[in-house]
Amino acid sequence: MPRKKKVIPDLSTEEKIKEAARKVFLKKGYAAARTRDIAEEAGINLALLNYYFRSKEKLFELVMVEKMQKLLGVIAGTINDESTSLEEKLQLIASHYIDMLTANPDLPLFVLSELRSGSEHLIKRFQFGGMLLKSSFFKQLQEKRPDINPLQLVLTLLGNLLFPFVAKPIFQAVGNVGQKEFDAMMADRKILVPKWMKAILKSK
Amino acid sequence: MPRKKKVIPDLSTEEKIKEAARKVFLKKGYAAARTRDIAEEAGINLALLNYYFRSKEKLFELVMVEKMQKLLGVIAGTINDESTSLEEKLQLIASHYIDMLTANPDLPLFVLSELRSGSEHLIKRFQFGGMLLKSSFFKQLQEKRPDINPLQLVLTLLGNLLFPFVAKPIFQAVGNVGQKEFDAMMADRKILVPKWMKAILKSK
DNA sequence: GTCTATAACCTGATAGAC
DNA sequence: GTCTATCAGGTTATAGAC
């Protein structure tokens, strides 16, 4: 039985370029990123990038769609589980988001700022247009607090989870918070955010 | 007594360019904005832009600093007022932020995404490095809930207020929310957010 | 101050050798 | 598949006339 040729396998050229594109696009955004940066980061030549992917834009859309799925997938996988209670869902969403964002801290700002200008058409690929509104999560929110617009609660929940990462640079400066302290605070939020959401749901 | 020459006075050329720069930079961001766009928007020639402002970057920094002040000024003006209670501060911050952001919906995403890449040095100009931490607001939070890191509460408060505007495009798509409905929801949040913050502060 | 014309540079993409 | 060399087009910035 032949084992893998390399324990740490070299990535294919195509994958090396994609990986470099992820890094450069996420750091600089589409407009500021140069294909030359990506080629250099991948350790290959500029011409090769256009050989594998037709253009800068094609390569970008690949990365963008992937990152949108990553960002929206966290919630999509949880809100329709009929077997979990509202409180369990809150805990799961918080925990999954914080874990994913701690590993990918600049993901939300990337997706949101690219959606602002130029990539609006990509929103349409994600047919959440009802997927959230008809979810089990939504129904449970409405049942618990029929007096509150569930979208307001969703905004608050996601704001609590995503905003610290969106505002990370300014928050670290203003609050005098180092990297380690930031990560510790985010870990605490896995408990804090669901607890606070429950407090909101109980408030008269 | 001579009255003003024009009831609606023409802006000076310099101010016309600045106004155009605000519009174009906020919509597209620094990298994607072209000086030609700004000149055209201002109704003047490209050369004139460089005559008044030395370069694209100088013009950008002018706009960027102005917008950072606008974004941070809302909270700065409130948190050190010794004459208001914690609950009053929460109401004031919420109300002022929602009003300002409803009038300038793409301000926070602009500032935050430009700070991510390339404008980090501008953070230093704002010596909030203690301004928040030593504020009356902070002390009141600590007094009320000594068991909670006040920074966590600030993150939650600002996330509640700013995040809806940061995520506006995707939220409107996913939630099937039109412009009018969005504005109405934000108006509601002037009441909801302080109420929910109070619920959090009371939770055991 | 304001314009036209152009310089100087940069960027995405391709041609063509290997 | 991968490289070097280069093209074509766009961008910021400036020179110089008015």
Image (tube, coloured by chain):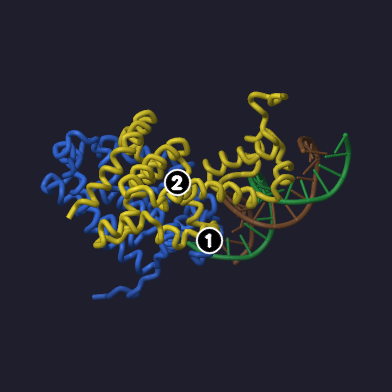
Chain colours: A yellow, B blue, C green, D brown
Q: Amino acid at mark 1?
A: Lys
Kindly identify which numbered label has been placed on residue B1: none
Left or right of B176, for residue A190: left
Q: Secondary structure at mark 2?
A: helix
Q: Amino acid at mark 2?
A: Val
Observer-nearest residue: B71 or A177?
Answer: A177
> In which quadrant of the rendered view does residue B192 lie?
bottom left
Classify 10 Å Cα crowding around label 1: few (below 14), some (14-19), many (20 and above).
few
The residue depicted at 24 percent of the width and 62 percent of the height is A147
Q: Which mark is residue A74?
A: 2
Q: Residue B191's x, y, as percent?
A: 22, 58
The answer as to whether the residues below labels 2 and 1 share one chain is: yes
Tell me the chain of label 2.
A
Residue B175: x and y in percent read 41, 61
> Which chain does the numbered disc 1 sit on?
A
Point out the image quarter for the C terminus of chain B: top left
Residue that badge 1 annotates:
A124
Report the side of B42 relative to C6 (left or right). Answer: left
What element does badge 1 sit on?
A: helix
Tell which circle, 2 or 1, labels the residue nearer the N-terminal end.
2
Q: Is residue B50 visible?
A: yes
Q: Residue at x 53, y 50 (%)?
A: B31
Q: Is residue B3 left or right of residue C7?
A: left
